Image (cartoon, helix red, strand yellow):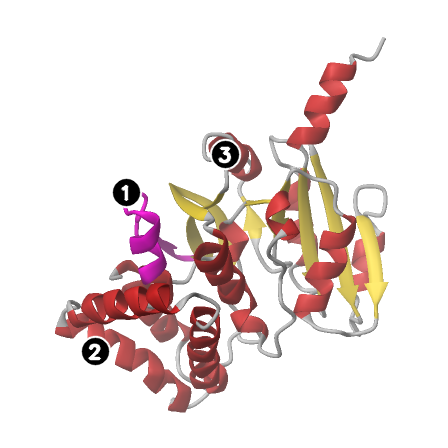
Amino acid sequence: MVNMADQVNKSEELVSIIIPVYNSEFFLQKSLESIFNQSYKNIEIICIDDGSTDQSKKILEQYSDKIKIISQPNQGLGKSLNTGIKIMKGKWFKWFSPDDVMLSHTIETLVDTAKKFPNTIVYSNWEIIDEKDIKLRDFSESNYNKLSGFEFNVRLLDGQQINVNTSLIPSDIFEKCSIRELHDPVAIDYDFFLRTALLHNIKFHLIEKILIKYRIHTKQLSHKNISKTLDNISDIKDEILQNLDEQSQNKFINALKIYQNSKSRKRKTMNFGMKLLSITPSWVSDTILIFYLNKIRRGR
């Protein structure tokens, strides 16, 4: 006889992994296999093929017995994510890139931690690999777990980026805060995290373990668009602050100024160097970009 309590428990523990797929044939299979090999088994995998013109859809169809496939004309990252969110059934949502790879214990570790921190988005450190699966370096996020919610939000306003591929998000957050379908896909996760934090008092907790292999490759990185994305992020901050009452706005703005002025000259120089990448020739080494990302984010 099936135990109904066990059925309910399994439903509550379900993790929905949504993978937006667009021309991802080179690394898609390896990414999917890493999810199939998870020690945590109570997951659903929803792949949104966003009008791919390569072999991505055929690769997905090879695993039709293990994943749910939704095909749509090309509509962009935000639309793909929201398509999956509308039909997911999990207690937790995980956005994952078809370029990246999970370690075998990734979901288990995320869930175990998420259970301890309600109303919280958990995320982790990560490892950077290249297109040949060669490890380039580890990436350790700044640990702000002991900061107050307000202090953490100041770091977010300063530009603290969280690698969304490492995160696990409670699904009930989407009842009050949706993913916006922005024109700049690079800014979508930052916009979501900042709105959940400032407008809905969602907390964040870092797991100080490496849980994914984050892949960089030449087709992924666009040095020419870095400056544009930084401008878009600045506009997003201003817009979200406008949704707060005047007293809260001023409190955040003043705290942000104090925090930014407290940074060392070295950190300010690193930030400036990041902006310079926007005018660097396309042949610039990806290692330089990694260097700036790592130094800036660890130094916040």
- 3 or 1: mark nearer the eye: 1
Q: Which of marks 3 and 1 is nearer the N terminus?
A: 3
Q: What stretch is highlighted in magenta?
A: 135-154
Instruction: Give the residue at mark 3.
Output: 109
The magenta stretch spans residue 278: no
The magenta stretch spans residue 147: yes
Residue, x 63% and y 52% (percent of image)?
A: 174
* Image spot of residue 126 (x, y percent): 43, 51
3D distance between C-alphas at marks 2 and 3: 36 Å
* Viewer-closest of 162 and 258: 258
Per the rendering, the mark at residue 18 is: none
Three-letter code, disc 3: Thr
Residue 92 in view here: yes
3D distance between C-alphas at marks 1 and 2: 27 Å
3D distance between C-alphas at marks 3 and 1: 20 Å
* Image spot of residue 160 (x, y percent): 36, 63
Q: Is mark 3 on a helix, strand or loop?
A: helix
The quadrant of the image that shows the N terminus is top right
- 1 or 2: mark nearer the eye: 1
Instruction: Give the residue at mark 2.
Output: 269
The quadrant of the image that shows the C terminus is bottom left
Give the left or right position of residue 162, taking residue 143 as reference. right
Kindly indicate the quadrant of the structure image that contains residue 107.
top right
* Viewer-closest of 120 and 292: 120
Q: Which of marks 1 and 2 is nearer the N terminus?
A: 1
Three-letter code, disc 2: Thr
Instruction: Give the residue at mark 1.
Output: 146
**Total marks in image:** 3
Q: What element carries label 1?
A: loop
Three-letter code, disc 1: Lys
User: Residues at badges 1 and 2 in contact (C-beta under 8 Å)?
Assistant: no
